Image: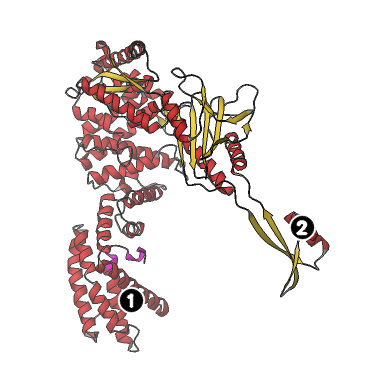
Amino acid sequence: MPDLLIELFSEEIPARMQKRAGEDLQKRITDGLVEAGLTYASAAAFTTPRRLCLTVEGVVGESPTLREERKGPRADAPEKAIEGFLRGAGLTRDQVVTRPTPKGNVLFAVIEKPGRPAADIIAEVLAQTVRDFPWPKSMRWGSGALKWVRPLQSILCILADEAGAQVVPGDVDGIAFGDTTEGHRFMAPGRFSVTSFEDYEAKLKRSFVVLDSQARAETIWHDATNAAFASGLGVVEDAGLLAEVAGLVEWPVVLMGEIGSDFLDLPAEVLQTSMKEHQKFFSVRNPKSGQIERFVTVANRETADNGATILAGNEKVLSARLADAKFFWENDLRVAKSDMSIWTQALENVTFHNRLGSQADRIGRIAALARDLAPVVGADADMAEEAARLAKADLSSEMVYEFPELQGLMGRYYIEASGRDAAIAAAAEDHYSPLGPSDKVPTAPVSVAVALADKLDTLTGFWAIDEKPTGSKDPFALRRAALGVIRLILDNGLTLPLGGTFGPHAWSDNLLAFFHDRLKVYLRDQGIRHDVIDACIAMEGNDDLTLLVNRARALSATLATDDGENLIQGFKRANNILSQAEAADGVEYSFGADRKYAETDEERALFDALDQADARIVPAMDAQDFATAMAAMAALRGPIDAFFEAVQINTDAQTVRRNRLNLLSRIRTLCLSVADLSKIDG
């Protein structure tokens, strides 16, 4: 069976689009082949700045012949019905057969679709793929109608087997399929032909093109770390930058350059951000001082002077960029050391949301809430309020205007420079955290107070104006804010009833339900089922997330035991019998069972077990010792099972029946005091 090789060769494809484009090419081609009846053994896509490549191994030589049989109307049906059947089948009357059936003679159409050569199918699928390719942005060029991310220059499409390679006949918008490609733009210009994927990959490498993006990334990282190590330095890891740079070059050549001494006193984060954002440079750090001292750039070619000219040009451009950063830094420091209120006052003219006021209005709300939260988190109230008022001051700074991703971090530097307490400075950097499920959670009390206040103000504000997430849309990142609150509370073990924080508003219950939904997602990843959380949410105090999660974890652990799992069945049996009896009798059996009416040892044993469990559960619940309460509840499994085996609840003796129903009521009441087990699945 032949192998298929496709290459779409163009001007430079943006690095951020390459990975997805390779995936789209593979999916669209292979799906199209399979739909047309061509199976294959394996497929792989590759990308470089100038090419998308797909290799498909073991393609069958032609699609199979398909035979389809369609049942039509009776042979004596009205003529119009027969004509419609023939038209749908694409046959004439003499091409269908008549067969006897229990309902009489019926017309049958036997439609045979002969197989097609693989080359014909591939040509159609490839042409359709190119015309409909889902680039985020595309362009037209020249007089053609074809749209591509950058001008498409050639299409390589061959089928290769032991007998050799053949070009698949076809074209797209005047670009005929061929068997040639080009090497490196500068180091190996000119076209050459290929006969297979192995031949293609080998000739590309000889023409200074590394086809595999992962191989290019590994080469870059290997050479960069070796160069840094030779100077006693280390490269700052950045997987995103590495992937991007690997998409900018076909033949990576690593060069390490110097940072001007005038710029070495800039904060390491400023150097790193400026070099990454503007120049796509890797930062090289001194492991002893932590300072960024050099940079690594990746050229797309080898040169006679071993990159000296390229490096000199990069150093010159970098100096100009860092001169701007130094100017911003020094100007900002002067403001920070003199009067940071200049920045906070400027935020009065910055709109946060047209219905929620300015950034300054928001800061005022956050400061008041941080003061209220300070006792809960163990922070000084005055310090928490001051930290909240300064945490967003750096939004007015020149550095953050240039590099928005440094907000918070620059605030910490500037507050430190102003001579204020280190805890206030740390809160500026920490209050945005955590930003995701794996982000570090602040633990310093002042930082926790401000971080909670920031996120709670965001949530209550947008809930108050009815701007909630809908479906996949969450423009104000409210799901992330809620998860941040959850992690701040849980990781710091805080007792913070959210109901009191929201206040008595019409939307409060809805917002609490939103927190519960986010909590379910968070705990699901920790192995706690939704129904377990629902059983705990149904209990009083469900706005205290620490209390709620402690209860859910204890219940989850209990249900993981045989006693716990089987207790659920016993509870549900008791609850079902009791509910049915109460509905039938029109009374509530909750007036207390009396031991003197017990007729069997199993009944008396259950009385004893319930008394013992009650004695353990009540004080344990008062102390929020859920593990002890759950263990005591699980211990009821044996006596309850024995009780149901030994007695008939709905006996003819009405006094005994009522007593047994009241005993079931004790089971229900005691179990429901720990968690709402009726919400547990199964």
Give amino acid for label 2.
Answer: Leu
Q: Is residue 672 magenta?
A: yes
Report the magenta residues as a range: 671-682
Q: Nearer the viewer, mark 2 or mark 1?
A: 2
Task: Give the residue at x 43% y 18%.
Answer: 187
Q: Position of residue 472 (x, y in %)?
A: 46, 43
Q: Which mark is residue 86?
A: 2
Percent x, y of residue 478: 39, 40
Q: Nearer the viewer, residue 208 or 523?
A: 208
**Distance between the alpha carbons at the discs numbered 2 and 1:** 73 Å
Which of the two residues, 3 or 360, is positioned nearer the viewer here?
3
Q: Quadrant of residue 593?
A: bottom left
Alpha-carbon neighbours of circle 1 within 10 Å: few (<14), some, or many (≥20)?
Answer: many
Identity, as a three-letter code, of the amino acid under mark 1: Tyr
Q: Is residue 59 left or right of residue 78?
A: left
Name the element at disc 2: helix
For residue 534, which quarter of the picture?
A: bottom left
**Could you say which disc has been placed on residue 589 in the image?**
1
Residue at 30% from the left image edge and 40% from the top image edge = 438
In the rendered image, the vertical position of residue 249 relative to residue 622, given as above or below: above
For this view, does 184 lie left or right of residue 329? right
